[in-house]
Amino acid sequence: MQARFNYYGNPVGEKFQKYLNSAARAFESTLPAETAFLCMIRASQINGCSVCTDMHTKDAAHAGETPDRLNLVAAWREAKAFTDAERAALELTEQGTRVADAAGGVPDEIWANAARHYDDDQLAALVSLIAVINAYNRLNVIVRQPAGDYQPGQWS
């Protein structure tokens, strides 16, 4: 499989990616790394982004995440492997990723649950992470960027 278009080799695409990466640095150390990985993986699964699913799953494993938890991200509601805080973050990620599916956006009870587990800086980081990963997912899905050959830390 080949990409429709070399977005990452295009000057405009490279410039946008540079700014998007810079924006992502704003929240890097604010959330627990495990939570960030879980949320990026879940959004990428929902959006069908094989590039981001491949990258973030491999990076999470490389950082010490267990295969059991990685294998259960798509079914997190029924899995005992996640903390209440991680569940709140995953739910906010799903709701924030599927905004087009709900006329009212993210329900108040989902936000309130996340706010019980995260302070304001962490909530800002979580919202920012959800926005950034959804942007990357859309870039990759639109150009049909192929996945599978990512090596942990390749884009660090």
Image: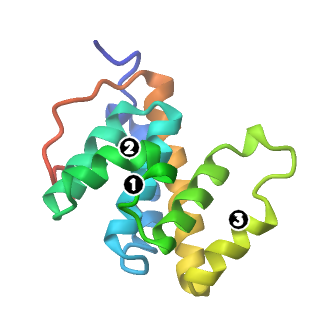
Q: Which residue is mark 2?
A: 14
Going by the numbered disc 2, the residue's amino acid type is Glu
Quadrant of the image containing the C terminus: bottom left
Give the CA separation, mark 3 to mark 1: 32 Å
Dot 1 lies on which element?
helix
Image coordinates of residue 143 in percent, x first then y, are 45, 23
Q: Residue 99 appears at what percent x and percent y?
A: 72, 46
Q: Is residue 53 visible?
A: yes
- The amino acid type of the residue labelled 1 equals Lys
Task: Verify CB contact (< 8 Å) between mark 2 and mark 1.
Answer: yes
Q: Position of residue 149 (x, y in %)?
A: 16, 32
Residue wearing tag 1: 18
Q: Secondary structure at mark 3?
A: helix
Crowd class of label 1 (few under 14; some 14 to 19; many from 20; radius 10 Å): few
- Quadrant position of residue 2: top left
Q: How is the image coloured?
A: rainbow
Q: CA distance from mark 2 to mark 3?
A: 35 Å
- Residue furthest to the top in view is 1
- Can you tell which of label 3 and label 1 is closer to the viewer? 3
Q: Are marks 2 and 3 in contact (CB under 8 Å)?
A: no
On the question of residue 17 being in view, the answer is no
Q: Residue at x 63, y 83 (%)?
A: 116
Q: Which mark is drawn over residue 107?
A: none
Name the residue carrying label 3.
Answer: 110
Vertical position of residue 69 compared to residue 24: above or below: above
Q: Is residue 43 above or below residue 80?
A: above
**Is 96 positioned to the left or the right of 55 in the image?**
right
User: Which image quadrant for residue 62?
Assistant: bottom left
